[in-house]
Amino acid sequence: MSSFIIEGGCKLSGEITPQGAKNEALQVICAVLLTDGKVTIHNIPDILDVKNLMQLLIDMNVKVNCIAPGSYTFQADEVDLEYIYTKDFRKKSASLRGSVMIVGPLVARFGKALFPKPGGDKIGRRRLDTHFLGIQKLGAKFVYDATRQLYDIEAEELTGAYMLLDEASVTGTANILMASVMAKGVTTIYNAACEPYVQQLSLMLKSMGARIWGIGSNLLKIEGVSSLCGTIHTILPDMIEVGSFIGMAAMTGSEITIKNTGYDQLGIIPDAFRRLGINLEKRNDDIHIPTHDSYEIESFIDGSIMTIADAPWPGLTPDLLSVFLVVATQAKGSVLIHQKMFESRLFFVDKLIEMGAQIILCDPHRATVIGLGNRLPLRASDMISPDIRAGIALLIAAMSAKGISRIYNIDQIDRGYQDIDQRLNALGAKITRRP
């Protein structure tokens, strides 16, 4: 099991550029299956989840070529559908949750798909009902083999339909959107997710010839077309990395500049950090974080404790709540962190408590953080990363702690953060990777 050894207490300085958005990359790479034309995608992050998805497409006989660092061409003109019935496909797709988004494109273009029950983060139940119910509405038939834990999907023809999603799932919306762009007639999706990732996917599909209205809203209207063509697409900067770097700078008392952040697509993320007392300055498309000797959590106007909760876009993304929680441990004041979507995502707080953080885990969805500022610095510790976002939160904690910490299972961090140790060491961190 690979690990990071972190010497805490190091100040960071300099500039860092966020990678391409992981969540967008997984969606738009799946979308290449919708056409036999050549698709070029720029700013693809070199991370484990993306590499595994690209390898899955290569195994399906999709032509994938690297034309420059972060830039690839894809051509799915000779897809081997027989591969999806192999044991190798089941094993690889089951280990990568993002691969569920190949279902929509495969059913739309080829009328069939096979998908195993997926793995991914250990953060509690993550239902696929939204994906499957939406694609069923379009006319696909799903058969679940409980013995082999496989979903077998077939559709002679997809037909546009009206649907109200039971949750504003980002990947669910993306999957249904990709299934509907070549369905016969008009599809209307209410309660659609409208995160920048979905907006980017929609814009890419439109450039391929899809007919989509309502981009950026929770009501999408799609008029099916008979075929799509190739295109060129550039992935946005990763908002989760931007938020992680903001929290990292504040907790380590460092002055850094985050370059090319895609600021206009960050939503309320900068203001949410300001509620924790963190000063940040927008400089064109960059964010400058000055040195913080301390920072103090705001309270509500009536003096009651601040609550930071995730919500569908344009609310706060749930992927950053782990970072907000760990950053609050070294603030002055108290805050309630409310993680509504995943019931196990806050369970990593026991590691922070061992490091000296004052946290009360109220239930699987809520934790109260009592920030004591510089009066109680975190202590170094050995810990295991349970998922991508908790992993980066634990890394931030270790960087601010006194002493030498070790984080195991860093493959989870590598799934979402490109060369994170090398990039942070360039700013002054002391992180050693051990196999």
Image (cartoon, rainbow, N blue to C red):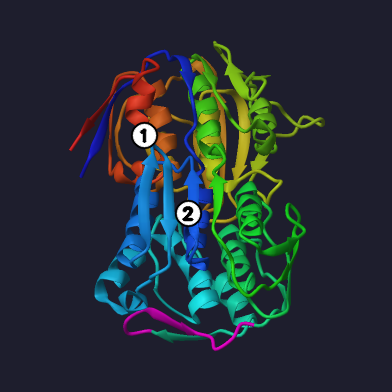
Query: From what the image shows, is residue 160 above or below residue 428?
Result: below
147 is within the stretch colored magenta: yes
Which residue corresponds to mark 2? 26
Query: From what the image shows, is residue 46 above or below residue 231?
Result: above
Per the rendered image, the range of residues in magenta is 146-158
Is 111 on the left-hand or right-hand side of 209? Answer: left
Of badges 1 and 2, the one in the foreground is: 2
Seen as rendered, the residue at the extreme right is 302
Locate the N terminus by quadrant.
top left
Seen as rendered, the residue at the extreme left is 435
Q: Amino acid at mark 1?
A: Glu
Q: Circle 1 — which element? A: helix
Q: Circle 2 — which element? A: helix
Q: Nearer the viewer, residue 116 or 363?
A: 116
103 is within the stretch colored magenta: no
The main secondary structure of the magenta stretch is: loop
Q: Amino acid at mark 2?
A: Leu
Q: Residues within 10 Å of mark 1 (few under 14, many from 20)?
A: some
Q: Position of residue 416 (x, y in %)?
A: 41, 44
Q: Position of residue 26 (x, y in %)?
A: 47, 54
Which residue corresponds to mark 1? 354
Q: Which mark is drawn over residue 316?
A: none
Query: From what the image shows, is residue 112 above or below residue 97?
Result: below
Q: Residues within 10 Å of mark 2 (few under 14, many from 20)?
A: many
Locate the C terminus by quadrant.
top left
Is 292 on the left-hand or right-hand side of 112? Answer: right
Residue at the location (65% across, 31% down)?
A: 263
Q: Nearer the viewer, residue 155 or 135?
A: 155
